Image: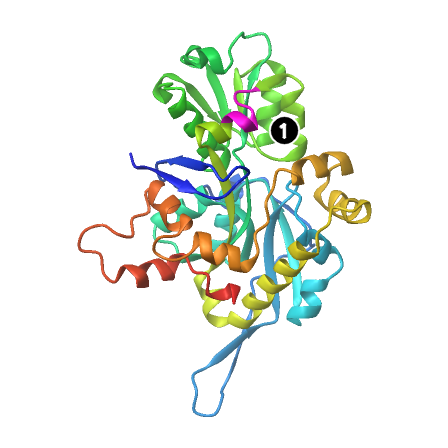
Amino acid sequence: MLAFWMSVGWRANRHFSVISLQGRFLPSLREMNMKTTTKNIVSASVAAVMMGGASLAHAADSVNVAFFLEWATPNQISKVEKAYDDAMGVKVNWTDFKTGTAMTEAMLAGDIDIAYSQGLSPFVTAVQQGHPLKMVGVAMEYPANNCYIKNGLGIDASNASELEGKTVAVPLNTMADFAFRSYMKHFKVDVSTLSIVDMEPADGAKSLADGNVDMACIFGGNSSKAAAEVGAAIMTDAQKVDAGIGSFDVISVTEAFATKNPDLLRTFMEVTAEANSAWTGSAAQLAIVAKDAGMSPTDTKDQMDTFIFLSPDEQKAKYFGSNGVAVSAAESLGLMFKKPGAWNVDQKISKVVTGEYLD
């Protein structure tokens, strides 16, 4: 298992530790409970145009974007106000998903072009399996997702070893799974002694309330709020910082979309950056984002106060390149770029992790 320390400048500019996760096969679309915000999600079509003596140029006539409900971000204002459609000159369809793994499966099926705020873990798993995806940006930095221990068990950070033998709800191959394994490593809990049940966050929170599991690892505002009513987080945000445990979400795309539609992708990134820059947290802004995220304005503010939205320059300086945080984090999850005998390391990295569309 690989481990590393990466400085992401979150809060007190501490270091976050990341642990290795095993690659898993992705579920079929039939197994996913996926809700769409548009009536019909269609694969982006491509029109080929000959440019005097140059190679073929392609332009999609629509772009399909994946996002999370209960995961509030400034660019939801641009989504609601159709700023993406106006700037990109095409119809932008937005589909909400419950997990990053579901986002990946939809991308591989050709139903999604861009996944906004996908967890690093499902992205890495897909690339490990040979799927042609690219990380092109960092959606945000945030404290690691919480794992809530059922009230009344008498277990907390001081005696976390007593979790051995307990039942835990975890949405596998997500950043909540990533956080869960980071906590267990920190507390020296043998994961093999736990009964791990693969559950989406809402189901995990319900199972915690019903007493069917002893701990549930959660992401999403409403699901986290429900879990917090019947359980306590295994670590506070301050304890996470001290332990070096944190997270970030990525903006990922299919390689085909990036290759055929570089200008559309750059414009998408520009509109996102403008939304982040314009964010002040005003009551008017919060009202728009909260409604689109399916959360109350108070819960939306509380959640967004824990997020850090980096500028394009900050992303490039910190996350991209052979020595960037993104490469180190991906390698800690098992995606090897620098193994002995690897061909052109920089070229290999840029094929999977690239900041070129932030320019």
Q: Name the residue under label 1.
A: 224
Residue 237 within the segment the image draws in magenta = yes
Query: Secondary structure beneath disc 1?
Result: helix
Q: Residue at x 43, y 83 (%)?
A: 55
Asked whether residue 136 appears in the rendered view, the answer is: no
Q: Which of 63 and 308 is in front in this view?
A: 308
Drawn side of residue 352 relative to residue 236, left or right: left
Q: Quadrant of the N terminus?
A: top left
Q: Which residue is drawn at 23% across and 61% down?
A: 343
**Image position, residue 187 (x, y; %):** 40, 20
Drawn side of residue 194 relative to residue 41, left or right: left
Three-letter amino acid code at disc 1?
Ser
Residue 7 lies in quadrant: top left
Q: In this view, does 350 lie above or below 178?
A: below
Q: Give the range drawn in magenta.
A: 233-239
The colour scheme is rainbow
Crowdedness near tag 1: few (<14), some (14–19) or many (≥20) residues, C-alpha within 10 Å: many
**Image position, residue 257 (x, y; %):** 49, 65
Q: Nearer the viewer, residue 281 or 184?
A: 281
Asked whether residue 218 appears in the rendered view, the answer is: yes
Residue 195 within the segment the image draws in magenta = no
Q: In this view, does 293 lie above or below 113?
A: above
**Image position, residue 70 (x, y; %):** 66, 39
Q: In this view, does 56 lie above or below 101?
A: below
Q: Nearer the viewer, residue 70 or 144?
A: 144
Q: Residue at x 62, y 67 (%)?
A: 62
**Image position, residue 341 (x, y; %):** 17, 55
